[in-house]
Image (tube, grey):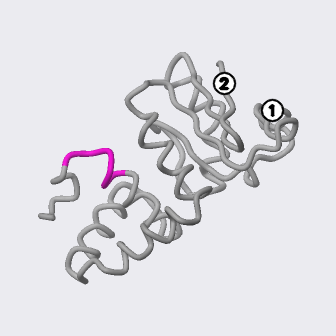
């Protein structure tokens, strides 16, 4: 594991998926109900508890948000989660965009995210991260 700090963001890079998931799955589960074989992790630092392997780093550096990756391809997606959490102007833009979606598009996106196992408290955040890092047809809808 190696890490870097960008302002209030902790970016942790792991050697492989198994090590990453062992270190971060419990925290991700606390935050969004996901656990298991994830491709990356993201969560507010407030979900890190004493006893978690990253606890001291988070406390020492006054971290507000944590992302964990093992493959560089996941980094952009995970960084968008941090941006949504930390940048209130960006969050408002995305929330407005979500609210402007038609009911049909929003319903299709929600069903897609449910199938991936996401709970309702992260739907907008996941929408924006996938929307801006994946191909336009990722959700199976036309833009």
Magenta span: 130-135
The answer to which image quadrant residue 112 occupies is bottom left
Which residue occupies 35% across, 61% down? Answer: 113
Which of 28/44 is in front? 44
Residue 133: mark: none
Horizontal side of 107 relative to 60 (left or right) equals left
Residue where numbered disc 1 is placed? 57
Which of 141/6 is in front? 6
Mark 2 neighbour density, 10 Å: few (under 14) some (14–19) many (20 or more) = few
Which element carries disc 2, helix, strand or loop? Answer: strand
Residue where numbered disc 2 is placed? 3
Residue 123 image offset from top left, x and y in percent: 43, 66
Which residue occupies 35% across, 72% down? Answer: 97
Residue 4 image offset from top left, x and y in percent: 66, 26
Residue at the extreme left: 142
Horizontal side of 142 relative to 14 (left or right) equals left
Which residue occupies 49% across, 37% down? Answer: 40
């Amino acid at each position: 594991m190696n890490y870097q700090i960008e302002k209030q963001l902790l970016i942790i890079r792991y050697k492989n998926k198994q090590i990453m998931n062992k270190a971060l799955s419990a925290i991700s589960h606390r935050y969004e109900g996901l656990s298991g074989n994830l491709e990356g992790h993201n969560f507010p630092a407030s979900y890190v508890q004493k006893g978690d392997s990253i606890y001291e780093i988070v406390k020492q550096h006054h971290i507000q948000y944590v992302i964990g990756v093992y493959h560089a391809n996941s980094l952009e997606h995970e960084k968008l989660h941090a941006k949504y959490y930390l940048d209130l102007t960006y969050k408002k833009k995305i929330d407005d965009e979500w609210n402007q979606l038609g009911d049909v598009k929003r319903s299709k996106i929600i069903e897609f995210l449910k199938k991936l196992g996401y709970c309702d408290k992260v739907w907008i955040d996941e929408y924006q991260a996938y929307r801006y890092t994946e191909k336009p047809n990722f959700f199976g809808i036309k833009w």
